[in-house]
Amino acid sequence: MNTEITRICGVWWRTLAKIQSKKRGKPAAKTVAALLDDAMTLAKSGRTADAGQLYEKLLAAKPKNVAVLRNTIQFHNRYSLRFRRALPAVGTLLELRPNVAETQAMAAETLCNCARLAQASQHAEKALALGPDDPEILFVVAYVAMEQKQYAAALAHLEHALRIRPDHLPSALQTGRALAAMGQLEKAQTLCRDLLETKPGDMNVIGLYIQSTRVKPDDPIFVHLRDVVLPAAERIGGLHLANVLKRLAKAQNDIGDYDAAFKLFARAKAVLPMQYDAKGYSRFVDTLCQNVNRTDYFARGDQTETPVLIVGMPRSGSTLLEQILASHSEIKSAGESPSLNVIVQDTKARTHNGGDMIKVIRQIPEAAAQKLAVRYLEETARPDAARTLDKSLHNFELLGFFARLFPKARIIHMRRDPMDTCVSCYMQNLSAWHKYTQDMDSLGHAYLQYTKLMKHWQAVLPNPILEVDYEDIVQDMEGVARRAVEFLGMDWDPACLSYQTSDNQSRTLSARQVREPLYTSSMQRWKRYETHLDPLKKQLLPLYPNGFDAPAI
């Protein structure tokens, strides 16, 4: 433990002793405030585990202190990202200060992060009524609207916030994200350039700009990132350096320096390594494949056909298919909804634990299953939509549970060449959930487990499943679109062929790509990085019995 943490913990234990002994009465508010400041300093420096310990101890000692509750909620929402841990503090704060705008806004943000969008909206409305001209409140209300893909409403709230406080950076950034999601990329880029005039090193702004732009070699923001921001980040290290390296790698990839881009991503992963549990993941997949069978779904579940899952590996072309289908007048998208995963967590099933998943599938009472089905529909279904798409791709791990809730719901399995998929996953700024992207061996192993599990689901689930290949969309978009619309039980809508100009929006990493024309150059992109891919080839060899120049099986 370093000197700073030792100092902070020493102060903490002395304060705790005073609180527990009560010999000197309550500690001064300044003392608690100082501890909160110390915890936030740790959080901002990336030491979230140490900060979390301090917040937990403060909560244990002062469970009804409003400042402690607020700071803990903010910490989990903005730094630890362990959103569910904020829920108890939210409940207590609502009991203590229900008529305070900040309380309702914190409840809205937390519930939104926990994928409880219906509840989040209710609290957002209350927050707005209590604080209609508070930029912080307006920002949270806009955030909830963004998560529900209500971008016009989000922009209206953000514009209001910026009229009141023109220098409110969170609202300005969220405006840029909304513009990018709506396909207004040039406006998003202009906004970023304006912000960088006064905040040239802000990585939130630079990240948004790089993500919404196809970078050119002479772009001054790219040059500044490479020549000024990177050297400064190297002195800081940690998460900040990793973020800078990933943004720079994306820019180098745009420019066409593929070797430099690959090396930058490798360096970023080395700065903050993630440990992929290959044995544990294999055990999870094997348990499901050996135990879940068709008899587990006999005459049970909600019979609605409204929800549609699009599943597969990231970077498989799913955003393109989503945009095509969501342009249909009777099909809407909930985006990458975390709702199904959160519901599974609420059953107490542990992540990637096959035994827990089997128990839930087989033992959940029918009444409880129906209640969870209603909850999922409340979180994802869209008004006036005969079909609602949920494009959270890793739901492929949860299809056994989904089928227990909705045995008639359709599933679209999006596929892409395995080498292209894995390399694209490696070359993207994916979240820590995707630990298998740490290296080529892990990527190959995870991909083989995914294919094994999907083959099993296709054999045992009662749900209709359609396989769609990205390469087929590129070569025959209309043919694939018609087949997918027919699979969903809908009449053909020509609007599906005009997805690039539709009002439907995407917030995923592919938001910029789906606004561009289709090119066959997106196929076999992995060859640009071939000198680095021997470990991946070794893993994926079973999928290429005729060699890597032939299509995978």
Image: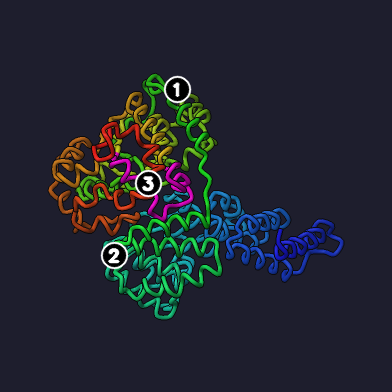
**Residue at the disc numbered 2:** 214
Towards the viewer: 225 or 390: 225
Of labels 1 and 2, earlier in sequence is: 2
**Residue at the disc numbered 1:** 290
**Residue at the disc numbered 3:** 533
Where does the image place residue 508, in percent across and percent down from the top left?
34, 54
**Label 1 crowd (10 A; few <14 / some 14-19 / many >=20):** few
Residue at point 33% right, 58% down?
258
The amino acid type of the residue labelled 2 equals Arg
The amino acid type of the residue labelled 3 equals Leu
Quadrant where the image shows the N terminus: bottom right
Q: CA distance from mark 3 to mark 2?
A: 25 Å
Of labels 3 and 1, earlier in sequence is: 1
Q: Which label lies toward us, 1 or 2?
A: 2
Towards the viewer: 552 or 339: 552
Asked which secondary structure carries label 1, the reply is helix
